[in-house]
């Protein structure tokens, strides 16, 4: 059952496999055009983890080397994770982002191309260490992700150095989607490496 289906039928919260993430997006695509807001709403409360995963993954591509990309990603992560503390369900985004339209046919074609990768991902991720996602830890994860995103700004001065916090965010987002505490914990460990890089970068800058 997709995330949208769980929401309609009131099913208990559970992890979503990568294949189910793809299926949820394909179901929301419909025909003609689909807006970013419609896609986000389809994931409901899992939209934060899904967006966090995609933001981190995109920054691992050559897009991450584009000047200003780390700053834009940082702003979006702060916006997303800040809201996760004070509200439930799909996150609020500016109207110009929510109303942006995507061609449904192209979206479905793209989703079909990543299905094999989703299957590979499902072989190594599964719900485990779910206690790490207890509601009492939400603030901790939010603050941690914001700190990780902020580290992208100084690391953006070093070519591709922002890949470290980007990988961390992608792993934490993946963990949130699938309730895989091991993936999220690995992301946190990667963040420690990113923190060390930030300190090294800052101390190397002449005063």
Image (tube, rainbow, N blue to C red):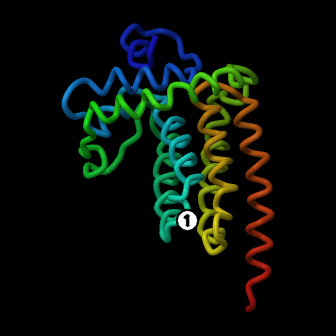
Q: Nearer the viewer, residue 143 or 3?
A: 3
Label 1, on which residue? 65
Q: Position of residue 159 (x, y in %)?
A: 64, 70
Q: Residue at x 35, y 29 (%)?
A: 108
Does residue 30 appear to the left or right of 207 in the view shown?
left
Q: Quick one: SS at disc 1?
A: helix
Does residue 93 appear to the left or right of 173 in the view shown?
left
- Where residue 6 sits, quadrant-wise, is top left
Q: Position of residue 175 (x, y in %)?
A: 65, 32
Q: Nearer the viewer, residue 20 or 82?
A: 20
Quadrant position of the C terminus in the picture: bottom right
Q: Which residue sits furthest left?
A: 32
Q: Residue at x 53, y 46 (%)?
A: 81
Q: Nearer the viewer, residue 119 or 192?
A: 119
Does residue 12 appear to the left or right of 178 in the view shown?
left
Q: Vertical placement of 38 versus 58: above or below?
A: above
């Amino acid at each position: 059952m997709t995330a949208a289906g769980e929401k309609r039928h009131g099913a208990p919260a559970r992890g979503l496999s990568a294949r189910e993430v793809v299926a949820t997006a394909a179901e929301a695509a419909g025909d003609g055009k689909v807006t970013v807001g419609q896609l986000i709403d389809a994931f409901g409360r899992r939209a934060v983890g899904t967006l966090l995963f995609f933001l981190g993954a995109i920054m691992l591509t050559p897009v991450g080397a584009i000047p200003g990309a780390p700053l834009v990603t940082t702003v979006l992560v702060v916006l997303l994770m800040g809201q996760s503390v004070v509200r439930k369900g799909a996150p609020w985004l500016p109207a110009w982002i929510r109303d942006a339209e995507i061609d449904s046919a192209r979206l479905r074609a793209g989703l079909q191309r990543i299905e094999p990768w989703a299957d590979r991902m499902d072989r190594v991720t599964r719900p485990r260490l779910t206690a790490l996602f207890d509601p009492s830890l939400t603030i901790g994860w939010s603050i941690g992700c914001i700190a990780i995103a902020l580290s992208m700004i100084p690391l953006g001065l070093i070519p591709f150095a922002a890949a470290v916090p980007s990988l961390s965010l992608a792993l934490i987002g993946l963990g949130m989607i699938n309730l895989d505490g091991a993936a999220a914990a690995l992301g946190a460990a990667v963040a420690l490496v990113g923190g060390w890089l930030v300190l090294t970068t800052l101390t190397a800058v002449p005063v």
